[in-house]
Every structure is written in C-alpha cells, then in structure tokens.
Amino acid sequence: LNIINSSSSSSDLQNLPSSSDIQGISDVSSTVPTPSLATNSSLKDVFQATSVPDDTSKSCNDLPVQPKLAAYPINHQNRSFQSSWYKERPCHDIQNELIHLMGNQIREEISLMVKNCNYALMADECRDISGTQKLSIVIRFVPDLNNSSIDFSSFVKEYFLGFVPLEEFDAITLAENIVEFLKNLNIPLESCICLCFDGAAVMSDQQAGVHVLLKKYMPKSIYIHCSAHRLNLVISDTCKVVFYIWDYFSIIGSIHSFFTDSGVANKYFKQAQKQLDLVQSSRLKLWAETLWDSRWKAIDAVIVNYPAIIKALDDISEEGSRSRSINAAGLLMHLKKSIFIITSFILHQLFGLIKVLSDHLKNPALDYVRGEELVISIIQQLTNLRNEQSFNQIYDKAKSLCEVNEIDLVQQYHIHRKTKIPSRFNDCFINSTVGQRETLSTSTDFMNQIYFPLIDSMLVELNDKFSLKTLSFMKSIATVYPESKNFLSINDVDEFSRHIDVDSNALKNEFIVIKTMLMSKTINNVIQFLNELIPFSTAFPQTLRMIKSAITMPISQVACERSFSKMKIIKNYLRNSMSDKRLSDLTVVAVERNIAIDYERIIDKLARNHKNSRILLY
C-alpha cells in the first residue's frame, strides 16, 4: 500500500520517510511475547514492501510477499502473513490506523507545547467535496521562551488540530463538539483567553452564540470577530452603494469567461499581447465573493492588459463567427465606455489600500493590537483621498489610457427617451432614487456620483465594523507595545491583567523598574521589548506573561482557511468517499508537516495494538 497514492496527491505530505529507510517486514509466530522494532524502519516501505494492488477492493485476493530484514535473526523458519489475519484486517484498515497514529502523535506534540500557556481558539466551517460540513479547529499561542533572541516567525505559533464533522449546526452542538474535541487532546479549557470566529449569527450572537456558551468552560476567553471576514463585508457592502459597481464586476467576470472558456479567444488574446509587447505571462483574473482580495487582482489584470483585450475583442468581432463575434462586439462596446475606464482606475486606487490591509490580516504574526492600528491607518488614508485633487490624478490616468487606445473619454451617449419624474411625485420633495440612472459625462459627474460615494461608504463601513467597542481593553493590552502612547502606563494595566490572572500590583512594580532600565535604549516594537526582557525572565515574570498573552490575541482566523485549502487537495472529485477521521488525520499531517514524526513510536504502537495478530514489526 502506498499512503500517498491512495489517500492524497498533495506534495505537502512529505513527512513520510524515503524508501531506503526500511528493508522489509518479517513475521513471527504468536509465541513471541513482546514485539520489537528494528533500526531505520519506516512506514512508507512497510507498505511498499507488499505487492498489494492499488485497488483495495482486490487486496485480499493478492496476499503480500514478505521480504526479510537484514537485522532479522536467521532461524530457518518459513514465516509469512496468515491469510486469515489479513482478511480480518483489510489493508485500508491498517493504513487508516497508521495515519491516525501519525495524526495523533502530532496532536500530542502540540498538546505538550500548549501546556501551561495561554492560547487563543479559532474555528471556522467549510463543506468538503462530499457535502459534509467540517469545523476546522486551530489554536494560537506563544511557547515557552529560552534566553536567545527571537523573531515573530519563531515566536507566535498557530497549529491546526483537525476537523470536527458536523451533523447539527445549532450553537449548543457546536460548543459541545469543540469542548469534547479539546478535552480528548488534553488541552486545558481554562487556559483559553480568546475566541476568534466569523460573524455568523450562530457564532457571534450576544445571547446564545457559540462564544457565549464556551465561556462556561473558558471563563477567561473574550470574543473577537475575525477582521478578515469583517473586511470582506466592508467591500461587499461598499459595492452595493454605487449603481454601476455591480454592472462593472459583471463585465469583469464576462471578460474572464470569454477569454478562458474558448481556446480560440485565448489565442487571439495571446497574439495581441505579443504584438503589443506586453508581458505574456500576465493573465486575466477571476474575482469571487469569498476571495477577499480577488477584486483588486481582477481589476489590475484588466488595466495592465487593456490594450491587448481591446485588440483581441476587435479582431474577434470582425472574424464573423456568429455568437463569438457578437459577444466580442458587446464586450468591446462596454470596455470603451468612459464610465468603465474611470471606474476601473477609481476601484484600483481604493481597493489597493484595502488589499494592503487584507494581506496584513492574513499574516499569522499579526496580533490584535497591531491589526487594529493598521485599520486606523487605512481609514486615515481613505479620508485623505477624499478631495478633488486626488480624483484629478485618477482621472488623468484614465485620460492617458484613452489617448493611447484612441478612445473618446468624454462621450455623449444617445438617450433613447428623456428621463422624466413620475407625475405622482410632482408635489413631493424626492430625497431617494426613483429607479432612473443619470448619464455621467464630465469629470465632476464621475467624482460626485462614483468617487466620493465609494469613499464615504468605505469609511462608514470601516468605522462601523472596526469600531473600538472595547477601548479600555485595547488600552490595557497596548501597555506592552512601545509604539503605543500607553506604553508601560501603570494606570491602564488592570483590565487585561485581571483577564489573564496576572498580579497587577507586581506588574506595576515591574513597569516602574523597566521604565528606568529602558531610558537609555530605543525600543521600536514589542519583539524588541521582549528580547530585552528575556535575559531578566526571573525579574519580570508578570511582564513577560503580559507580553506573551497580548501577542497571543489574534486579529483573524485565516489559519482555518489554510486548512480548507489542504482539505480540497486531499479530498477531491477523484477521492470523494474518504472517511471524516482519515481526512482529518491526513490534513493534520499535511498542514503541520514541520513537526517531525517518530516512525519508531508509530510502529511500536501498532504492534502493541495487535499483539495476537501473528505479525511482528521489527
């Protein structure tokens, strides 16, 4: 049996040893009391040593041929697998057991690391290819420190623990599943200081949400709404404000489909890129609601390849191939409109700032305090863009693109009929839309009808969804951040110190001493501050605990999204009947591939589990 071929084609499952690590398997009689393990044995070749076909349904008819190990004592006995034993234990059962042992060993290592540490719990839901709903469980913590210098990559740890299959989706069931899962791994519930979920009602409800129910078991935990999900809501709500935005993204999606669904259209596009000396490796991007930064990437690809798109559509429309030519002519008409070109540059500018924030929120090293500070910075930048001068710079870029491609930017559209306010509104003051769109032609029209409304909507949504409702709590956490104005402020430490069971009086005394100690030094961030204190860990234990807990607080739950990506590689259309347990174990092995697996221990455990199996693993 080959674990990789029969369970996952992912290149990430590289924890398995090479085929040179083991030479085979030997069997002894049931009279040997205790199984033992030979040096350099490995799981991969334990399976590869057998000549079992890939189709496990036929494996019982083709029993394995068993070679001898070099270290096996020669006693001239003819030993082999007993067919009765093999039929009672099909090959896939043995394989699943070994995979489960490997996954559990990784979980045990994580459980040992998180012991005596405060941690944050992150969870998110996803549906696999077979339609089963999965709850991904990830924990974030700061392991025990040594006396050496550290950086964020080796400091904050996020570990994927596995998937919990869901049959019911109410808050009580979800909370019970999470608690049972953590208890089985011997992870202390009382050490959880933060819960980071998405904004779904079942998770975030203030009366009966999952985070409320979990606080019965995790009294020190506070709930943080994932900032990445909040940011996606900001973008989605912003796109609903301006009437043309949904039309714009429909055109973007149609352009991508037109050139990717047809090999002929794609050939025209590549030829246009080559003739115009554009980067031929540049491709059109698909945008989606759930891909947080896909909108900006799709817009950027259209702007970069705009000349090639126009030329390709023009060539295809003159080809005369019926539907393809008609579709190309329709897209060409929309792409040459001034509203499309100017909107492209407006969204490219505004969503570019949002993408910067989105990329930072995906960074596992980003903590809660620094994430909120980044949001405040983006809000300030958007505010600074709300002026006529900034819009004129965007308008000039659109004008330059039109001049290069010989497009009239100030177009006069033919109006089929004059817009008229319904007669029932003659004696009314109208302060809302009446279902009619205004024709935009001048730069002032685009500024007032698209540019300013988009910025205003973004600012409203960002201020609403990222409001500092726990301002006093934020100030308390920020006391260990050198870039904060509350750094080492003894008046603001009480709230967070109570939350993590730190002696506030001892902490204040340590702050006073640290202030004096750092007067002659320049500390720029919390990591530098931590590196300064590590050699004095016995003198400042409360401050070190405060720093570790502050950095443990997450800003988003994107680690759960990474586990979903691995899940879709492992369980796909070709392997759609994999059991939930096997999928969870394989994903743990794939995601946490940096944790070494002791294959000697794995084989020992398997041998102990089958003492009467008439098989001995050396």
Image (cartoon, grey):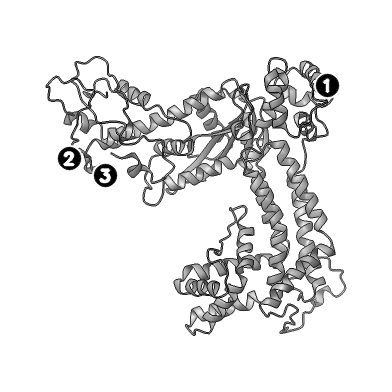
Question: Which of the two discs, 2 and 1, labels the residue nearer the N terminus?
Answer: 2
Relative horizontal placement of residue 147, taking residue 370 as reference (left or right) = left
Instruction: Give the residue pinned by disc 3.
Output: 54
Q: Residue at position x 72%, y 58% from top?
A: 350
**What amino acid does circle 2 point to?**
Asn
Question: Which of the two discs, 3 and 1, labels the residue nearer the N terminus?
Answer: 3
Residue in the foreground of this view, choosing between 317 and 581? 317
Relative horizontal placement of residue 214, taking residue 491 as reference (left or right) = left
Label annotation for residue 516: 1
Instruction: Give the residue pinned by disc 2.
Output: 61
Q: Residue at position x 28%, y 32% from top?
A: 46
Q: Are marks 3 and 1 in contact (CB under 8 Å)?
A: no
Q: Are marks 2 and 1 in contact (CB under 8 Å)?
A: no
Residue in the foreground of this view, choosing between 343 and 171? 343
Give above or below for 249 relative to 228: below
Question: Which of the two discs, 3 and 2, labels the residue nearer the N terminus?
Answer: 3
Give above or below for 580 relative to 113: below
**What amino acid does circle 1 point to?**
Thr
